[in-house]
Image (cartoon, rainbow, N blue to C red):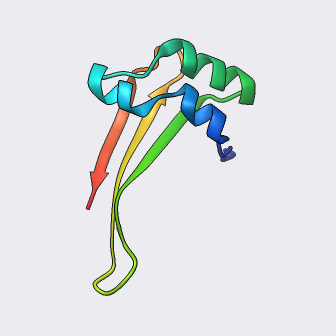
Amino acid sequence: YELVPLSTADLVEVDAQDAFRRGRYDTRAVLEVARRYRLDALVLGTVMHYQPYPPQALGMEVELLAIETGATLWSSSLQ
């Protein structure tokens, strides 16, 4: 496998806020990013909480998206 970091413009295309509201990402945007980078799957992560000083803490939400449908195959929230 290969990790391909998305540009800021790509991240704007795949609008996470809209996905949380609707329960899925815009299929058109996911397919466009997938074609551009020849992806089989797309993993998106959002830092929800960051505390760099003791006690250090990091909270994240991570999702694995199906390229064909834009549906979430797997997700996790870490605190």
Residue visible at 57% across and 35% down? 11
User: How many marks on residues?
Assistant: 0
| In the foreground, 35 or 74 | 35
Residue visible at 33% across and 40% down? 75
Whole-percent x and y of residue 40? 61, 28
Q: Which residue is outermost to the bottom?
A: 54
Whole-percent x and y of residue 43? 50, 40
Decide if residue 68 is on the left or right side of residue 10.
Answer: left
| In the foreground, 52 or 37 | 52
The quarter of the image holding the N terminus is top right
Whole-percent x and y of residue 61? 35, 48
| In the foreground, 39 or 50 | 50
Residue visible at 36% across and 21% down? 24
Which image quadrant is residue 37 in?
top right
Residue visible at 26% across and 62% down? 79
Decide if residue 78 is on the left or right side of residue 2.
Answer: left
Decide if residue 68 is on the left or right side of residue 79.
Answer: right
Rendered view: 22 above or below 60: above
Whole-percent x and y of residue 50? 36, 67
